[in-house]
Every structure is written in C-alpha cells, then in structure tokens.
Image (cartoon, rainbow, N blue to C red):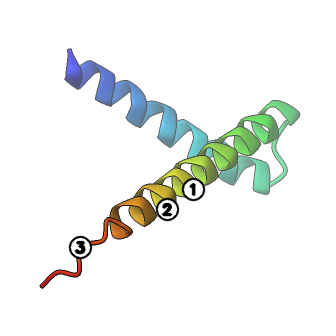
C-alpha cells in the first residue's frame, strides 16, 4: 500500500514539474495555474524544512 502512495506522490511531483516547464514555454492557463501551485508547494516544503532544522539546532547540545 505504501508503494502505491509513493508512486502517486512521485507522479504528482513529476506532473507538477512538467507543468512548470510547459508554463515557462507559454503553455495554457491551467498549466500556469498548476505550475504556480507546484512552486508554492515547493516553497512551503522548503520553509518547513528550514524551520525544522533550526529547531533541531537550537536544542542546547554543544556536541561535546
């Protein structure tokens, strides 16, 4: 079941990336909308990753 979920997520990611490229080349309006949503989702994931890393680094452990 997890394989089906991962394949679905991979398909969505690849489709989003294809829409970003297509929109850059002047694709239809719906492709530009999907591209915008894909780029926004990427920014949200990146932001969440930075916040999580920052939270892990401020744990007060000096590493000694």
Q: Secondary structure at mark 3?
A: loop
State the residue in front, 61 or 51: 61
Label for residue 47? 1
Query: In this figure, which residue is indicated by the disc labeled 3?
Result: 61
- Answer with left or right where residue 45 lies relative to residue 57: right
Q: Secondary structure at mark 1?
A: helix
Q: Earlier in the sequence, mark 3 or mark 1?
A: 1
Q: Residue at x 77, y 48 (%)?
A: 23
> Residue 47: x, y in percent?
57, 56
Residue that badge 2 annotates:
50
Compared with residue 43, is residue 57 higher up or lower down, i.e. above or below?
A: below
Q: Which comes sooner in the sequence, label 2 or label 3?
A: 2
Q: Tell me whether the residue at label 2 lies in contact with that at label 1, contact meaning CB atoms closer than 8 angstroms.
A: yes
Q: Quadrant of the C terminus?
A: bottom left
C-alpha distance separating marks 2 and 1? 5 Å
Would you call the spot at circle 3 few (<14 residues within 10 Å), some (14-19), or many (20 or more)?
A: few
Instruction: Classify mark 2: helix, strand or loop.
Output: helix
| 59 on left or right of 19 | left
Q: Residue furthest top?
A: 1
CA gap, disc 3 and disc 1: 23 Å
Quadrant housing residue 30: top right
Find residue 29 and name its label: none
Q: Are marks 3 and 1 in contact (CB under 8 Å)?
A: no
Residue 24 image offset from top left, x and y in percent: 77, 56
- Identify the residue shown where x is 49% and y is 40%: 13
Task: Name the residue furthest left.
Answer: 64
Relative depth, front residue between 42 and 64: 64
**Which residue is found at the position 69% from the left and 46% from the top?**
40
Q: Quadrant of residue 41?
A: top right
2, above or below 27, in the image:
above
């Amino acid at each position: 079941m997890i394989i089906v979920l991962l394949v679905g997520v991979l398909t969505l990611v690849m489709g989003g990336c294809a829409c970003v490229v297509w929109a850059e080349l002047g694709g239809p309006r719906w492709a530009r909308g999907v591209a915008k949503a894909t780029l926004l989702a990427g920014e949200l994931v990146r932001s969440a990753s930075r916040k999580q890393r920052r939270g892990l680094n401020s744990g007060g452990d000096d590493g000694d």
